[in-house]
Amino acid sequence: MNKAVSRREFLKTSSGVALFIGVSGLLPQMISCKKNKEVEKILKKHQLTAWVKLAEDGQITIYNPAAEMGQGSMTSLPAIFAEEMDADWSMISVEFSPQESQIYGSDKWSPNNKVMLTAGSMITYGYYSIMRQAGAQARYILMHSAAEYWKVPMGELSTSKGEVINRRDNKRIGYGNLIPFLNMPDILPEFSESEFKDPKNYRFIGLDRPRIDIPEKVKGTAQFAIDIQLPEMLYGVLERGNVHGAKPTLNNESEILALEGVLKIVPFDYAIGIIAETLEEALAAKKLLNISWSEAPASGFNSQDCYKKYEKIASAKSAAKVITNEGDINSAFKSAAKTFSADFKNDYVYHAQMEPLNAVVQVATDGNSAEVWVGSQQGFDSKLGVPKYLGIPAEKVKINLQYLGGGFGRRSMTDFVLEGTGLAREVAPRPVKLFWTREDDVSYGAYRPLTLQRLQTSTDVHGKITGFSHCVVGDGGNLVASGIRIDYYDIPNKYAEWREVSEGIRLKHWRSVGHGPNKFAIECMIDEIAIYFKKDPAEFRRILLSNSPRGLATLEKAMAMSDWYSNIADNHAKGIAFLERSGTLSTGVCEISVNKKTGKINVHRFWSASDAGIVIQPDNVKAQMEGGILMGISSVLKEQLTIVKGQVQQSNFNDYEILRMSDIPDSVETAIIESREPPRGVGESGTPLAACAIANAFLKLTGKHLRHLPFTPERVLKALNT
Amino acid sequence: MAANSLNINNKTYNIDIKEGSTLLWVLREHLGLTGTKYGCGIALCGSCTVLVDGKPMRSCTLSLSGLKKDQKITTIEGLSENGDHPVQQAWVEAQAPQCGYCQSGQIMQAVALLAENPNPTREEIKMYMNGNLCRCGTYLRIVKAIEIAAEKTSVKT
């Protein structure tokens, strides 16, 4: 479909031109990019979409609208754009786009609402069509300009690796050399699927390019928000107490204010903030704070005792939010030949991203504008909520996105950004670096919720599953309900529900969200049934996946990779799991052994096969699967955050241990199933495989069930001795 | 106030910083050498690893008063001019980093490992690197990178 647009004037300078290519009915325009202010002005006026900057030497800057937290957005999204633009990769550099969601947002989160948010492994999915369209339109403008310049029909032109070529006389002109002759077409087409590049000519999508961010990450020059240094910068820290939501009363304000370097004490509802000249002074003052804390909803909460309450909630006729209700679960149980029931439990887990939270914020003296330097997964709130917090218009806030030293869901909250803003407002116009210690990061974390899953299933005499009922009890809505659906399994009667509790503990998405706990329960139940009926767990899943050819392909691939039927050492066993996360289907297989004296589980090898649709950067997808699986193993074998009388019991890596190199498997092999379906998410697909595959291997090896995450040595020994 | 003279990356820095400050804060917040990272403050994650006379040390718990005048400190910034130290090259070849935050510390620890033991076994790598945490789960690629670097270095010598 062609869309007519008016011809517009555009500025040309020797420094280059930015192609501002409109999508969805917005006007295309080209303007000089020499003066950033001018660009900003025009952006504001026309709300155009700006994806690329072209310089006369041929250098191309592509804007990445997503956060880069290690998942590779800095390379994969520009690769999609470069593919359709037919650019020369050696000439490409990438910058974070301005954090303007009206321009750079994706509407894949919610229709008609553009949002910049790097979460849920949604970025490739969310920007695939946007980047393709914009890249194709950039190429179209370049071809149109060359046609006008050479005075030949556009149909005689093609492009190759950053050049427009006249097929008739083989004359070539580089994209950068076209800048003086750039000419906006009267009509800028919206390209349809058949008009995009033929995948057989792909030079970027599906082929590996070294990641753009890696050289600076090995040089130590990659800039994280914690590295920001500004003139006159001050340091801020907060004491947030031991119980989430408790309110502070400071008892020694004058003593603290008298300390060397301390400039200001800033009270928050839930914390006392200190601003000092140096980080050391801020940290020293924090230690000397004498604060009385109020009671809070979490006061008296004991995390390890609450499972009894959750069991009662699961048993009672409690109110529930029904998530799935297909067929007739009650009649399935009535006519069942055999039924199964088991409870699965999951302790709190903490994000433990390696860069503790921080933000640098500067508020203008008049309080009417602000600038923020932060590693954020962005979010639904306009400009991370800073305009609302300060009561100023969104255009008065500039967010400078930095690399994230890990996100995993924690950096999709804005609590730390607003804390930094609250401090900076008090000392405007001096900038403040808000700094969380690791202890702050652990104790005032926002955890993956503690949950109980009650699974009840029914089968016929042959072991065919006729009914599958899943009740999850926990705090946090979709945080606990995600991953509860099993649409891919051929089971006639399915029922799933969430029963709410509220504990006053801060909660947040944690890599793969509810999929970790829910898939753990589901996949363990599947193995329990298979083993009861003396069926091979992989073969059992093959039947369940008979209506999901894509799922089945991952199962077969993982079985082949792991040589599923091969004999292995007597004291080893393999376990399997299948699941969907972020639209990606994956099968995982692991091989474990157990030290029966210490209760330590060793994961020796791990295999995964995934169908993630079109894959932009195959090696990066593999890296995400590897990392996701290792983080999964870490959480399953080690990670446990506990709360006693409302107080978080862990504080740092001494008592909240995460996987170290000595405990990694000998190998993690990952395979990608080729697909032409739209790209889906992989960042979180590996993580939930770990719990179920390990527990299923343990069941095969020992005949015992592990139904409470994490599988600490004590729990393993207890299971072995039952 | 204590006046200190530190040799960092073959450059002499005269600094005037309060007693009790750690080398990490001096590097990062006072000298702007921010390639060395803060991760835990209790020497359990390795993000802050620097070399002191070639030995890997956790700068987060290294107080300035504990440093001797002539000791040579090397940070990630001083490892090479252009990021082309063999270990850094191997890191790129293995496409090891994800978020990248822990990688300066990982690289410094690996440099020390290969200086002590140019051809480490996989078990020796795991033992030597065990104090360096990576939350993204890049451990397997770090091992691979160290093996690449070891192989290249041993071919040269």
Image (spheres, helix red, strand yellow):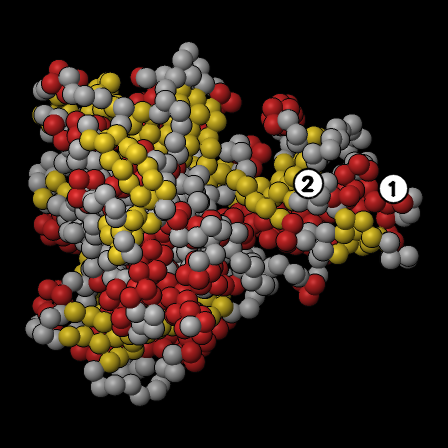
Q: What is the total number of numbered labels drawn onto the structure image?
A: 2
Q: Please, what is the three-letter code of the amino acid marked with disc 2?
A: Leu
> Is residue A236 or residue A206 the one in the foreground?
A236
Whether A365 is drawn above or below A298: the answer is above
In the rendered structure, the answer to whether residue B130 lies left or right of residue A35 reads left
Label 2's element? strand
Q: Residue at x 63, y 53 (%)?
A: A90
User: What x and y, as percent, mark residue A101?
Assistant: 52, 34
Q: Tell me the kind of residue under disc 1.
A: Tyr
Q: Residue at x 20, y 70 (%)?
A: A601
Which numbered disc flags the more N-terminal residue, 1 or 2?
2
Please give left or right for residue A214 compared with residue A39 in the image. Answer: left
Q: Quadrant of residue A42?
A: top right
Residue A149, disc: 1
Instruction: Quarter of the image for the N terminus of chain B: give it.
Output: top left
Q: The numbered mark 1 sits on a residue in which chain?
A: A
Determine the residue located farthest toward the bottom in the rendered image: A567
For the residue pair A586 and B157, the one nearer the viewer reads as: B157
Residue A496 visible from this viewpoint: no
Q: Secondary structure at mark 1?
A: helix
Residue A181 seen in the figure: yes
Q: Badge 2 is on which residue?
A: A54
